[in-house]
Each structure stands twice: as structure tokens, then as C-alpha cells.
Amino acid sequence: MSASVIPTPQDDVTVEVAGVRIGARHPVRIIAGPCSVEGPEQFLETAIAVQRAGAVLLRGGAFKPRTSPYSFQGLGLEGLRIMRQVADRLGMGVITEAMSAEDVPLVATWADMIQIGARNMQNAALLRAAAAAGMPILLKRGITATVDEVLAAADAIRGWGNDRVVLCERGSRTFEPSTRNSLDIAAIPDMQLRGGLPVIVDPSHGTGRSDLVTPVALAGVAAGADGVMLEVHPNPATALSDGAQSLEAGRFGEFMRALDRVAAAIGRAA
Ligand code: PEP
Ligand code: MN
């Protein structure tokens, strides 16, 4: 008998983040929060809304890799403290980015998973420092990186002794101007199969448009993504970063209901 037309990753590799197991045969994990932490009220309000609707991990940016030096650069340590406080209050784990090797020990003190951003996927010093921190790492595919290149970066982290790597498809820069990036659906099962690692999808940076976030998230889940990480804000119009691609916190329940239907259809309901 021939194998299923739906490929399944051979290894049952999972990565645990603050008690949440991400990976093969586990439910699709939803990671949500604002692009940037802007203050305690904004982060708490967002966190309560996403937790109530079913998100299992929080995200937020304290050190922000902005394209323009004139844009909001993040609250730094204060942002880390706010995230930790809110996450503890709600009993959740939190993921945030470290932008340089020097920042890793600080970020590791306050967060449950270290994010390596798309602009830093090939920053060997950062990858090495993150590996050494011994914490789970979310490795985002570089803006112009091939699948082979992101898998090589993951191999580097594993080579430095840290196997707890989750990959993230967040879209690549292409010739298409109507979206911020072009999200590569095929890369999701490809990275799972060839990388032997859990893969999540980021429809926020993958599209740059809040009206496209839900359909693209559903496509990612249908393609087998182990989780979705997306940006949510109480009032996207006033967001200090990435408002155009942020879902309004009040509408997050709607997103979750759509996602649950697709997850159930492929036997991966939460
Ligand atoms: C982010 O997740 O906030 C972010 C900056 O993502 P990326 O590195 O994919 O642009
Ligand atoms: Mn963002």
C-alpha cells in the first residue's frame, strides 16, 4: 500500500515551552500578542483577550528590529518586565526576541522562549548565544532565506547543543507589492519533513494586512503547521508598530473559531 498523500513528519519531535508542547500530533498551538509591548495596560488587555479565546502562549516585542531608525524601538527591559508580570499573572509562557548576542542573557531571564528574528537568522554569534542559554528557540525564516538556509541555521543551533528549536515561516520578500511578504505554504511541511522540527506560521508578517491574516493562518494550519503566531492589539489604529497587520483583540474569538474548524477538519483540534 502506498503512503498517505498527506506527508507526516517521521519524528515525533516536540518542543516544550512553559508546559506547552509544540509539535507532531499535538494540538495546533496559538501564540498571540502585540508586535510591541507599549505599556502594562496594553499588554494585559491583549493577553486577557487572547487567553480567553484560546491562545496558549503570549508574544510581545521589547527589543524591536525596525526597518527605520525613526520608528519605535521598543521598551527594552521595561517591556520584558511587563511581559513577565502579565504572563505570570495569567499563568502563561511568553516569547520575545533577542536582537544581539549580548541581549540573550537578559531576555533569557525574563522570557520562556527566545525569538530569533528574520533579520538575524544568520547571525551566528546570536544563534550561538541563544543555543548556550539552553532555552527553547523560535527561529524565524530570514526575509530572503531559502529553506536550506533556515535548516542550516537550525542545524547550527543544534550543533551548539540546543535541540529545542521551533521554526517559523513568516513570508519572504518577493516582487509582489500588495502584501508585505509572500508566505510560503510549501515551506511548512517541507521544513517539518526535512528539518525534523516543529514549524509554526506567522500570517501577520507573512501578509502585512489584517484582512489577510485569518485566511492565511487557516491555510498554514491546513498545510500542517504546529502553531500560529500572530499579532493582536486592543486598538490597531494606534499601535506603535505593525498596526496594519494586527488583529483587533475584540475580534480574536472570531479568528479562533475559524481556526478551530480547520484544525478539527484535519484532526488536530485543540
Ligand atoms: C516579530 O515577530 O515581531 C518580528 C519582528 O518578526 P520578523 O523577524 O519575522 O520580521
Ligand atoms: Mn511585528
Image (cartoon, rainbow, N blue to C red):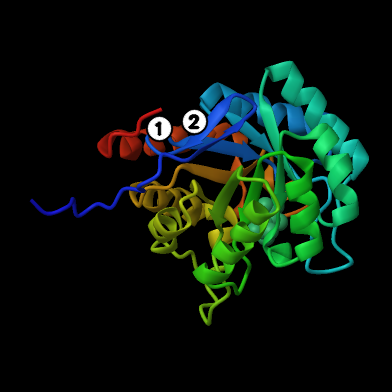
Callout 2–callout 1 Cβ contact below 8 Å: yes
- Residue 264 in sight: yes
Q: Quarter holding the C terminus?
A: top left
Who's the residue at 60% across and 57% down the image? 154
Who's the residue at 61% across and 35% down the image? 249
Between the residue at mark 2 and the residue at mark 1, the CA separation in whole angstroms equals 6 Å
- Residue 239 in sight: no
- Which element is circle 1 on? helix
Q: Is residue 171 left or right of residue 130?
A: left
Who's the residue at 54% across and 78% down the image? 174
x and y percentages locating residue 99 in the rendered image = 81, 56
Which kind of residue does numbered mark 2 sit on?
Answer: Gly
Dividing the picture into quarters, in which one does residue 163 lie? Answer: top right
Determine if the C-beta at disc 2 is less than 8 A from ligand 2: no
- Which element is circle 2 on? helix
Q: Is residue 135 left or right of residue 80?
A: left
Q: Quadrant of ligand 1?
A: bottom right
At label 1, counting other C-alpha atoms closer than 10 Å, the crowd grade (few under 14, some 14-19, many 20 or more) is few
Q: Is residue 185 above or below residue 264?
A: below
Front residue of this view, candidates 175 and 99:
99
Q: Is residue 238 above or below residue 178?
A: above
Q: Is residue 231 left or right of residue 96?
A: left
- Mark number, residue 257: 1
Front residue of this view, candidates 64 and 135:
135
Residue that carries the numbered disc 2 in the rendered image: 253
x and y percentages locating residue 182 in the rendered image = 50, 69
x and y percentages locating residue 77 in the rendered image = 92, 40
Front residue of this view, candidates 115 and 72:
115
